[in-house]
């Protein structure tokens, strides 16, 4: 019988993700982070690999991410509006447009959410609600 690595055992205990599920997801993702599409080369908690991303409200796992992307979601508290405001902030500054108010960024985030909704992007999933019926 194959020895289960300690971090895989912890993942199973903490998130209910069995070793086979982790390995299957890793193969599906071809070892790449679902967000940045990079293969992690840094050592995380003494190992190299992808981290289990999970919903902090439901504890359900969503996929495998690199440490940077997983931390970014955690710091943003899984808030799509905050993440869009961060994107607006970076875009404004990369285009030489200073940001003077956080309200401007959140207004732009709201506009982005409305736009995504208008093109039938399933925003309800991002907001944590069930997708609407077709």
Image (tube, rainbow, N blue to C red):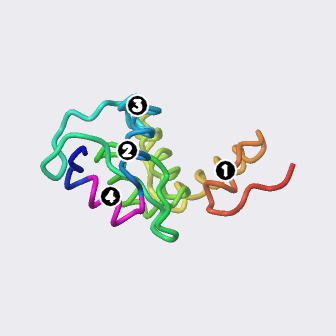
**Closer to us: 84 or 46:** 46
**103 or 71, which lies in front?**
71
Magenta extent: 8-16
Give the labeled residue for mark 4: 11
Please give the label number shown on residue 111. Answer: 1
* Residue depth check, mark 1 versus mark 2: number of the one nearer the observer: 2
Query: Residue 120 appears at what percent x and percent y?
Result: 77, 42
Dots 3 and 1: beta carbons under 8 Å?
no
Judging by the rendered image, the residue that carries numbered circle 2 is: 65
Does label 4 or label 1 sit earlier along the sequence?
4
Magenta stretch: dominant secondary structure: helix
- Mark 3 vs mark 1: in front: 3
**Is-magenta flag for residue 25?**
no
* Mark 1 Cα shell of 10 Å, populated few (<14), some (14-19), many (≥20): few
| Cα separation between marks 2 and 4 | 14 Å
User: In the displayed structure, does residue 111 sit left or right of residue 6?
Assistant: right
Confirm or deny contact between disc 3 and disc 4 (CB under 8 A): no
Instruction: Give the Cα separation between the discs numbered 3 and 2.
Output: 9 Å
Circle 2 or circle 4, nearest the eye:
4
Q: Which residue is mark 3?
A: 37
């Amino acid at each position: 019988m194959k020895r289960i690595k300690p971090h895989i055992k912890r993942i199973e205990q903490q998130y209910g993700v069995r070793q086979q599920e982790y390995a299957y997801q890793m193969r599906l993702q071809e070892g790449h982070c679902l967000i940045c599409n990079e293969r992690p080369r840094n050592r995380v908690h003494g190992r190299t690999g992808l981290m289990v991303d999970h919903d902090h409200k439901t504890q359900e796992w969503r996929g495998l991410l690199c440490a940077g992307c997983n931390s970014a979601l955690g710091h943003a508290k899984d808030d799509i509006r905050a993440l869009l405001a961060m994107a607006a902030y970076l875009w404004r500054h990369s285009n030489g447009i200073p940001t003077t108010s956080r309200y401007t960024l959140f207004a732009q985030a709201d506009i982005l959410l409305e736009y995504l909704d208008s093109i039938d992007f399933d925003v309800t999933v991002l907001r944590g609600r069930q997708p609407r019926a077709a």
